[in-house]
Amino acid sequence: MPTRSQAGLFSAVTSAFIIEVHSHLRQDPNDETAALLRVLIHKIDNTTFGNIPPALPQWAGPPRTIVQVQAILFASLAASLLSAFLAMLGKQWLNRFVSTNVRGTAIERSQNRQRKLDGIVTWYFDHVMESLPLMLQVALLLLGCALSRYLWGINITVASVVLTVTSFGIIFYIFIIVAGTAFESCPYQTPGARFLRHVFLTILPSAVRTTRSIVHKLFIFISSKLRDLIQASFCCRLVVDSWSSPLNIVAFLDCVVQMPGALIMDVCFLGPVVLLITLGQTIRHLAVALARAGYHRFIATSPQIQGLDQQTIMLDLRCVSWMLQTSLDKTVHLSTLKHLATMMTLADFDPALVLGCFNVFVGCIKIDVNNHTAVIMQGLEQLAMVSAMCFLRTFHQLSAVDPGSSILKDVRKRYQRAFPVETDFGGLPFYYTITKIHALANQLWDPRHIRWDDCRPSAEECISFTRSVAEVAQVIYQQTRYRKTPRWTLRFALHSLSLDPIPPTSAVADCLSIIAIDLGCDVSNTGFTMSDERCVRIRKMNIILTSDQRASWAGRESNNSETQKDGRK
Amino acid sequence: MRVGQVASLITQKLKRMAGSEDWRLIRSKRKAITALLPYAVRKERDGHSEMFDVFLRAAITSKDRGFTWHHIRQYASRIPHETSPRAIVLVLPHIRWGQLTDREDLIQRWLAAASAVPCTEEVAQCVVNTLLQIASQRELLPHIPADAWLWLTKQPSLPPICWGRDVGTRVHVVRAVRVLKDVEILKSYFLLVWSEWNYFPSDSFGDMSNHRLPALHSLYIPDGGVDHSLSDDGSDRGLNRRPRPSREDM
């Protein structure tokens, strides 16, 4: 670890200066000896020093400048020694991290590695390690300052040289911080630059948004309270009553007479009451918000509360994400994605996982430029299928949980670049999956363009897709005021029911449910229920149709029915 | 379990719809009902014909000339391979032949199925209906064997709204029947297609009207201006004076 040796070097240099300056902190015995000699000479010959008798020097402590210089030098020494100490500890920590003392399967070893990595991230290990060079830099700065100050009292010329070099170093450091903050590609990156960029890009906009939101809410709150106050005010009521009554001198005089009393009532009673109510409401809101935040921060996300299974799942998901990001081996990708596909739930996964799955998926598919047909690369059929399933699963989940995610936008952009809307996926063996992915990625994509004719899905694919189509049919049937399900869902049901061999029983049941829903049957008694999660998913993310499309579809349907009615007339 | 429940629900619902005779409602749901056909056909093959029968009832009640949704075409060609002869015969009149694929093979299988089922009024109706629909497709006419036309001689009572009768009066169908030179078939054909619910395109019987005028002229006797007159029972009552027929009378 280079920081350790550098810290040692700095400490040595600083120590040399400290020794030099340290003598000034105590009274110099040579000075006292010289004074005594001067007194003796004066006793022998009192004409040597003139009429003024020499006096013994009274030492009043070290000079203030020396104390300051010494303090700064010691601070520099302490910083460099602390840096060396932490560097030594850091080496031990890293040795423990790289040690592979766990035997077992690849999954168990990956989990162990991921656990260590999570610990490093949770406990800000990288920040601590990055602070070591920072401490050395601070130590160097302190040394430069102390030296300049010390030499300034001895010789200004020498001090000027030191000061110039130190100033140049400071200016250069500030420059590289600014450059590193402004340009991410700048090679002179420092921790300070990264911190400032984080502040400017994340914290500051967020703070501005939050402040704006708070001010807006505060304004609304104050204006509403003011309105309530005015409405409840005795004075205002008097004025309104007199204004609304027919103009006569008696009413006006009555109003003028009652006004002071009303004013006193307002000031004495109404003001404090409104203030107390407002204060109470504010305190209640704050307490609720704090309690909720505290619950989410300390209880809901606590590993003890989440349970072992949940922790293992999260650990596995992070492992998978890391594997996809770091490995280029297709076999590793395949085994990793297979593991991901077999996981029961995807809870709180890293959004980067979506990107990882997408990258693997894109690597397996190529587009024929002439006819926009998607084909799987030679030998990557299995990986393409598994990666498509995993990509859909993670993409779907992230779209439901965090529709505004920046990674989601990024994935959509990349997907649209890789697979234009007119891409033909007809020849792919996982047509349903890619159809759903395409629908999710292109939110304005029209599901009526789906071609089912040549599609022969696998049983798993068929079951999940049929289920989701049935749910969409149910939702849209309700949204169109119990009139129709979309035609494409019926077309899908027709195609699925006419497949040979017949799809799995649950898929057949879902297809029949689509038909039953369109016919107006109540299928809730037959076991067709939409789980809460799925309802939320469909409503939040618009699984295949966007809300605009549904609205236009509903509008088109109503137009059609009106046209039919006109025709009948 | 769930499949049975949903299927039962659908069957009950269709029964109610067909029972209410509300053809508008059934027509508005024809896409859903069509989507049900593959499943109903499979069930019929397995011996559960309730849903299939309800489908047929709904199709008939709809009074729609082309009841099924056009997306059925991919599946329709496979129907003869998957189901019983009865189902083939009964379901094919409700599918538009113009939209089907692999029709030549379908005709052969349909004829085989028609000959395999016992001839009832319902079966004869469906067969004749389908036969006329096939015949209306000009390119399919050569694929209809002469024996198939004998079904016309059974003279089933076609329903008032019948797609086969509507398209069966096209000129090439009339010619095809005449070319057979079988009086019984020709007579039965006319009796089947000639109804008060139907109309004939002007070109369908154009040949016959063209022949009618020369025939009348040949019957006209210049001196005396008489013609044979027929009694109510069709017997000749001898020559009768009549005004010379003009072109407007034709």
Image (cartoon, coloured by chain):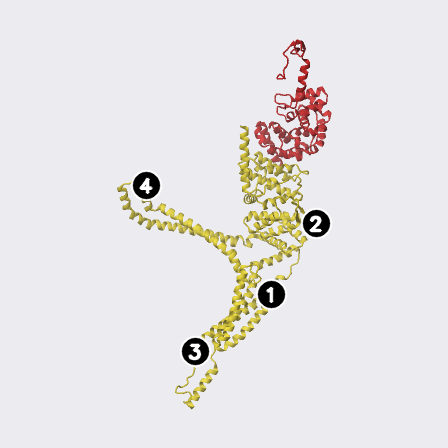
Mark 2 to mark 3: distance in Å?
89 Å
Q: Secondary structure at mark 3?
A: loop
Q: Secondary structure at mark 4?
A: helix
Which residue does the numbered mark 4 point to in the structure image? A244
Q: Are marks 2 and 1 on the same chain?
A: yes
What chain does badge 2 belong to?
A: A
Q: Residues within 10 Å of mark 2 (few under 14, many from 20)?
A: few
Asked if residue A513 can be seen in this view, the reply is no
- State the residue in front, A82 or B162: B162
Which one of the lettered chains is coloured red? B
- Mark closer to the chain start, 2 or 3: 3
- Mark closer to the chain start, 1 or 4: 1
Query: Is there a contact, CB below 8 Å, between mark 4 and mark 3?
Result: no
Residue at 48% over, 53% down: A209
Which residue does the numbered mark 3 point to in the structure image? A60
Mark 4 to mark 3: distance in Å?
87 Å
Mark 1 to mark 4: distance in Å?
85 Å
Which residue does the numbered mark 2 point to in the structure image? A379
Q: Amino acid at mark 2?
A: Gly
**Vertical side of A442 occupied by A517: above or below:** above
Question: Tag count in the figure?
Answer: 4
Asked if residue A382 can be seen in this view, the reply is yes
In the visual, does A136 lie left or right of B186? left
Q: Are marks 4 and 3 on the same chain?
A: yes
- Mark closer to the chain start, 1 or 3: 3
Color of chain A here?
Answer: yellow
